[in-house]
Amino acid sequence: MGTLTENQRHWLHYDWSQGGDEWSEAWGGSESLWWGTLYPRLRRFLPTGTGLEIATGYGRFTAFLEDHCERLIGVDLTPRCVEACRERFAGDPRLEFHVTDGTSLPMVADRTVDLAFSFDSLVHVEAEVIAAYVGELARTLRPDGIAFLHHSNVAALFVDGALPLDNRHWRAESVSARGVADACARVALACIGQEIVNWGQAELTDCFSLITPRGSRHERPPVVFENPGFMAEAVRLAELAKLYRP
């Protein structure tokens, strides 16, 4: 999508009047997205102790994570988003929010995070930023901690140096599932699972990576699954949301 400065400028001036819930419309809303898509993928690791949410926005998923974490640390590149979350969750002393520089997590102590989570944000950052965050996860995850990161896979789709698709969702073009797994291996993390999915188009532009420290009780041989029907899942959930909405 661009540099960190360009990302910061874009989200600083973004119209946050809907709180980010507009990006959940394909699922029929953020509640449907959480319970139908995200929770089934995370439920094995919930409830948990200390959670870390990278790129909180206005708290679209924080509102669900807080019920599953004893403590939750949220970080975002945009001060406006951090202030919005501090106001929204002011009544819960278990939650804290910090501005990050977009690559580091100095507000998070070593080996304190049980579950790190990021969805629908790091897809826009390039490989050097992903590598920086992976390095921070190597420092901050507990020995049996787990991370769920949503990132781009567009780098895997280039053919002879050209991208044969319209990158209309602004996915980072230097990031791939394989590249993230390699970045993990360089810092003694194991990428134990990757679900490579489509997003608003047929091509597999996105990936969800499960990451844990080497020697963790979660460590296993990596499982990679290509899921070209991911957006069909969203359509079904949107229809169900209409049916069961009060």
Image (cartoon, rainbow, N blue to C red):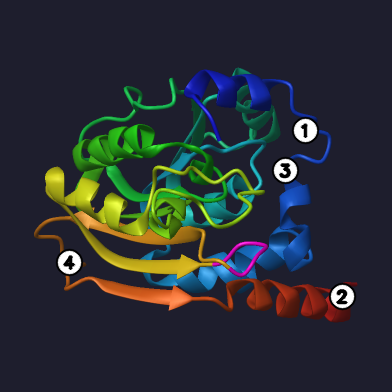
**Residue 24: in magenta span:** no
Name which residue type carries label 2: Lys
Image quarter of the C terminus: bottom right
Disc 1, disc 2: CB below 8 Å? no
Going from N to C along the chain, the mark reached first, 1 or 4, is: 1
Residue sitting at x 15%, y 51%: 185
From this view, report whether residue 39 is shown above or below residue 142: below
Q: Main secondary structure of the magenta part?
A: loop
Q: Residue furthest left?
A: 215
From the viewer's perspective, tell me whether residue 226 is left or right of residue 146: right
Please name the residue that numbered disc 1 is placed on. Answer: 16
Q: State the SS at label 4.
A: loop
Q: Which mark is on residue 219?
A: 4
Going from N to C along the chain, the mark reached first, 4 or 2, is: 4
* Mark pair 3, 2: CA separation: 20 Å
Going from N to C along the chain, the mark reached first, 3 or 2, is: 3
From the viewer's perspective, tell me whether residue 38 is left or right of residue 112: right
Residue sitting at x 28%, y 41%: 134
Please name the residue that numbered disc 2 is placed on. Answer: 242
Disc 1, disc 3: CB below 8 Å? yes
* Mark pair 1, 4: CA separation: 39 Å
**Residue 178 placement (x, y as % from top left):** 29, 58
**Residue 206 placement (x, y as % from top left):** 50, 58
Please name the residue that numbered disc 3 is placed on. Answer: 20
* Mark pair 4, 2: CA separation: 39 Å
Nearer-the-camera pick, 132 or 83: 132
Name which residue type carries label 4: Glu
Disc 4, disc 2: CB below 8 Å? no
User: Which residues fall within the magenta stretch?
Assistant: 198-202
Q: State the SS at label 3.
A: loop
The crowd level at tag 4 (other Cα within 10 Å; few <14, some 14-19, many 20+) is some
**Residue 200: in magenta span:** yes
